[in-house]
Every structure is written in C-alpha cells, then in structure tokens.
Amino acid sequence: MSRDLDELYQNVILDHNRVPRNFRELPAPARHAEGHNPLCGDHLTVWVDLDGETLRDVTFLGNGCAISKASASMMTAAVKGKSRTEARELAGEFQRLVTGHLPAADARKALGKLAALGGVSEFPVRVKCASLPWHTLKAALAGAEQEVSTE
C-alpha cells in the first residue's frame, strides 16, 4: 500500500475514534447486545432498530482502544439502511479483510472506507479489537442475550 494511502487510512481511523458516529443508545424496542474483549478491555453495546429486515438505525456506546471505537463507528455508518442479510455479508467480508484473506484492491471495492482497517491484519492482537463491534452486531441481530466475547 502506498505511503499516502496508509496516511489517509490512519487519518480515517483517528477521526472515527475522536468523533465516533452514531455514539448513543437507542430506546426500546431496539435490539441490543454487549461485547467484551478481555485482552485489551474493550467493552461496547450495539443497538439495532429494525424496520422489517432493514437496519433502520445502528448505534453503539462503550470504551475501548482506538481500533475498536473506530471500527464500531465505521460499522454503524456502513450497515445503516442495509438488510440483515447484507449486514451479515458485510461482516463476513470485513472479517476476511482483518484476517488478511481479502486483497487490498478487493477490499476497497467491497468495503469502501472500511478498508482503512485492513492494516490490523498485520497485528493479530488487534484483529479482535476491530472484529468485536461486528460480532456484537451479529449477536444483536440474532437476539442473543449473552455477552459476546473475543475469547
């Protein structure tokens, strides 16, 4: 990846960490799930307001490292307005990205700004940070009652 693109991606992550989008609780009857990464202490809650099969609104609250917070912020923006199926498919593509199984060119095409988080694939301990919001979203969509953990 070029140095300019690396810098742009780093700035996108820092911006979403400093000013997270959709950082708020949704009122009932929105679905929600809690996620925890005991390795670095990330803890968040994801709320989903459904309109049939469409994710009308997606929000989160929590504490964690810059990667988990940026990932949650970018995730909420990316899945809002998508169907449950599309959101699950996007989560799968994102997992391929952060585990190093999605080439950079394909990532930019399939994931847009989410491709900025592709660099975590070089740091295995950070993969869990970036993945936590996505696992928590899937749990919320499934109506899971147990906390999601990366361990």
Image (cartoon, helix red, strand yellow):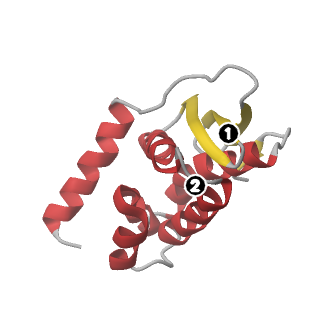
Residue at point 52% right, 52% down? 130
Locate the N terminus and report the quarter of the image it occupies: bottom left
Given residues 42 and 71, the one toward you in this image is 71
Q: Quadrant of residue 85?
A: bottom right
**What amino acid is at disc 2?**
Ser
Q: Quadrant of residue 15?
A: top left
- 22 horizontally vs 58: left or right: left
Given residues 53 and 113, the one toward you in this image is 53
Helix, strand or loop at disc 1? strand
Task: Tell me, for residue 93, which label it has, or none.
Answer: none
* Lower position in the chain sequence, tag 2 or tag 1: 1
- The residue labelled by disc 2 is 131
**What amino acid is at disc 1?**
Asp
> Can you give x and y, in whole percent of width and height, for residue 73 in the image?
46, 40
- The residue labelled by disc 1 is 51
Image vertical order of residue 138 relative to residue 45, above or below = below
